[in-house]
Amino acid sequence: MTDLLNDELNLKLLKLIVSGKGVDINVSELAKKLSKHRNTIKDRVNPLLEHKIIHKPRYPFPYLFKELPLMVISRHNFLRDEKTKYFIEYDDPIFAAFFFKEEEYNTMMISFHKNVCEHQEWYENAIKEEKIPFREEGYPSQVLHLGTGCFVKYNPSISIKLIEQNFKEGRQKSIRGYELDELSFEILKKLLRGEGIRTNENFLAKELKVHRRTIERRINALHKGGIVGRPVCRFPRLICPPEYILVKSLLEIKKQHDQILKALKSDPHIPWMIKAVTGRGGYNLVVFSTFYRIEDHLKWQEELDQRFPSCIGAIKDAYLSPTMTFSIAPDYVSSCIIKNRLKQVHGKKLVKIMKS
């Protein structure tokens, strides 16, 4: 795996496919799978992209979790200025940020790092370099460190089941002003599963000035090495559909751990679930869930408590609506990893040239 990421061509290829270049929706394949005319499929696909219900397809980069195995959820009291905005949008490790008012804090942030020390140094340097204004009260409180190896559920697109159910029940009639019919849902489900997506090896070969078979071999090797997954479409907020509320919950599971985990793993409301150990509250599970309305979450949580009486202790919820979402940019974090790897390779080449 290390050899694959020390190769300049592999890194240049990754830079393209992780950002979605050379990856397209295959309308003809979808038409064949769904026994429809390609123009009919095209008429359904285009609005899904135009209304930003999904992003264009790209290769996911699961190696992110190995390169940066520490996930940090932190609360901050940031100034609302251009400097802070630039920091959140363009600093390498920041995966997501939300406007979030609790006590004296106004921002919740998710970032990825190599370890605890590296995270601390990164934040201290951000202040020293004046990427963010220095404020005594600006330091995060109750920073939550989570190991990415502790994910017990990672299924970003599972909530498509909720959308489909809400449409069938008449609770939801459109997404971002677009009314989906049965065919639109079939297409959406396939794209979120990675069906009906093609890689344009000829385009990539031309961009990188190599043979198309070289591109095929390299992508297969990167996939086999666990560096990329198969190309898929994702929701713009990755784990939360448009117009849905994201809920970050800390749970204290006191009894029946296995049974509760099994129930939550099969629940379509939950795209992410991570085991945790926290110093306060006894929380041992972090759950990211998504709901159409806040009352849906309250009802769901009550039903979970009734289903497992006396098994779930303390719960702490944070509701993150679409309007509270400042930024979610998983592809940006991935592209920064690839960019930094390329710098390392170029640096080694330069040293080699200077020594020769």
Image (cartoon, rainbow, N blue to C red):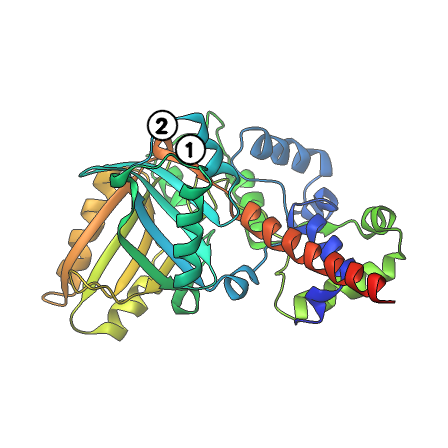
Residue 332 point in image, percent of width and height: 56, 45
Q: Residues within 10 Å of mark 1 (few under 14, many from 20)?
A: some
Q: Quadrant of the C terminus?
A: bottom right
- Report x, y in % for residue 320: 31, 39
Residue for point 79% across, 49% down? 200
Q: Nearer the viewer, residue 318 or 7?
A: 7
Whole-percent x, y for residue 313 in the image: 13, 62
260 versus 58 height, above or below: below
- Look at label 2 and name its amino acid: Arg
Q: Amino acid at mark 1?
A: Thr
Residue depicted at x 75% and y 46% = 22
Which residue matches tag 1?
84
Quadrant of the rendering where the N terminus is positioned: bottom right
User: Residue 338 is drawn in which quadrant?
Assistant: bottom right
Residue 92 visible in the displayed image: yes
Q: Is residue 25 visible?
A: no
Tag 2 residue: 80
